[in-house]
Amino acid sequence: MIEIERKFLVTSSLYKKEAFKQSRIVQGFLNTDKERTVRVRIKGDKGFLTIKGASSNNGLSRFEWEKEISLIDAENLLKICEKGIVEKTRYEVKIGDHIFEIDEFYGDNEGLVMAEVELTNETEAYEKPNWLGQEVTGDIRYYNSQLSKQPFKTW
């Protein structure tokens, strides 16, 4: 499946009041090659294995495959991931017809708050909430796989 999304920095914590759901996420990477990443994630009490392909030239789309795995399998796979575990809380906010996922990072990425919105095509219109800041779509520094290797606090 092809994932199409836009990423933005977040300028205030107002999204927290609008969130209908929040989840704690811990994730690591078995592979961070630029052509493909293999991610292990624990979200709440569920595990996931995700493979993402290389991004398009504009950074808006890429292949993504995800499968739910057992929590125990995810915990064991995290133990063999590359160095740099990413921890965050994800807030979900419905704005118009879209759901924005806002990630508040911890640890070496503390201070970074990003929002993503998934689209059905690259030119799809969407409402922009007032807490949405600069767009960082396609800037690889903001990919979670890169944040695991070059954390926000080191920039």
Image (cartoon, rainbow, N blue to C red):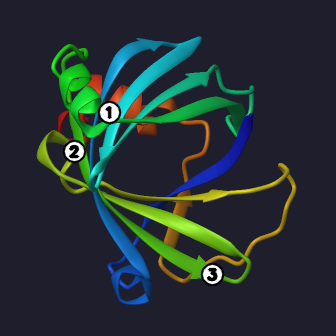
Task: Give the foreground label among 1 and 3.
Answer: 3
For the residues labelled 1 and 2, the Cα–Cα distance comes to 7 Å
- Nearer-the-camera pick, 15 or 73: 73
Residue bearing mark 2: 109
Asked if residue 136 lies left or right of residue 108, the reply is right
Residue bearing mark 3: 95
Residue 8 in view of the camera: yes
For the residues labelled 3 and 2, the Cα–Cα distance comes to 26 Å
Tag 3 secondary structure: strand
- Nearer-the-camera pick, 88 or 131: 88
Asked whether the residues under the numbered discs 1 and 2 touch, taking CB atoms below 8 Å apart as contact, a structural biologist would say yes
- Nearer-the-camera pick, 98 or 21: 21
Measured along the vertical axis of the image, is residue 150 above or below residue 121?
A: above
On-image quarter of the N terminus: top right
Q: Quadrant of residue 141?
A: top left
Q: Quadrant of residue 152?
A: top left
- Kind of residue sitting beneath label 1: Leu
Residue bearing mark 1: 147
